[in-house]
Image (cartoon, helix red, strand yellow):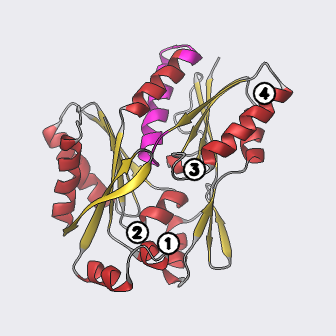
Amino acid sequence: MALHVVADSSCDMFDGDLASENFDLVTVPFSMRVGEVEYVDDASLSVPAFLDAMEACKEAGSSSCPSPHVWAQQFARFKESIAVTISVGLSGSFGSAEVARDMTCAEDPEKHIELLDCRATGTAALLAIHNMAAWANEGLPFDEIFARAKATVAETKTVFALSSFGNLVKNGRVSKFTGLLAKTLNMWGIGIEKDGTIAMKSKVKGSARMLKGIVADMEERGFKGIEAAITHVQNAQMAEALRDMILTKYPNARVLLGPTRGLDSFYAERGGLIVSYR
């Protein structure tokens, strides 16, 4: 029996990614409101156009997690499934999936649904899903795959770098002067996941220092050289440079690389990087 994973769109993957006779992935979308327009984070979303609209809007935007109904529609399709969500400390997505699981199992007690809180966003989920697909292709049973995924998430660390502070300024978390100064001086904000939430760690000037800062964080927080995942907001060149730096120091590491979908683009903003590792 194939392993069915249902993930919210913070995973930065799409329906059918990694598909095999042993593994299947479907995603449920967040939505983002910018001004009077609501954008659904599905395969039809143009991230560049979405970023243009977000940057042109003077108001702070907002996001909404998938509803229990949307989760339940996917749970109903499978006898067994694992739901993968953004951190419960960052969104209501886990709670929404939990409500959907309880409703689905009440209607059909034969259903087996497990929930995996990735304790971060984007790349943490991406790593977990890639590992689950590999374990499914090895023929491991459902319960062992879920147990391994939980253990992997528990030891995964996440660091991110922001080159734009537009959303932070609009939401009042950074002053307009600070945002303008950061843009003028080519400042980057480096942050980390902390107890399922996000905390700013430092600010550095220039992309070279930013890349060194990310690698330094990986070393300080115990990167074992096993695997890492990098997603970027319209910044493939910088993501590739970071991948090359990691592989220079850790040539045996597996490093995944890809673009963000809408939700992570909304929060990391143009140029941003998100990195998870263990």
Q: Which mark is first along the chain, 1 or 4?
A: 1
Q: Which mark is first along the chain, 2 or 4?
A: 4
Are the two marked residues, 4 and 3, in contact with CB atoms closer than 8 angstroms? no
The residue stretch that appears in magenta: 118-143
Residue marked by disc 3: 9
Magenta region includes residue 148: no
Q: Residue at x 30, y 55 (%)?
A: 239
Residue marked by disc 4: 105
Q: Position of residue 187 (x, y in %)?
A: 24, 72
Residue marked by disc 2: 270
Q: Any mark on residue 51, and which?
A: 1
Q: Which mark is first along the chain, 3 or 1?
A: 3
Amino acid under disc 1: Leu
Q: Residue at x 46, y 48 (%)?
A: 122
In the visual, does 231 lie left or right of 216?
Answer: right
Residue lying at the far right of the rendered structure: 107
Q: Residue at x 47, y 27 (%)?
A: 149
Q: Which mark is first along the chain, 1 or 2?
A: 1
Amino acid under disc 3: Ser
Magenta region includes residue 125: yes
Q: Is residue 79 above or below residue 54?
A: above
The residues bearing labels 4 and 3 have C-alpha atoms spaced at a distance of 23 Å
195, 223: nearer the viewer: 195
Q: Which mark is first along the chain, 3 or 2?
A: 3
Give the position of the C terminus as an image quadrant. top left
The residues bearing labels 4 and 2 have C-alpha atoms spaced at a distance of 41 Å
Camera-near label (4 vs 3) is: 4
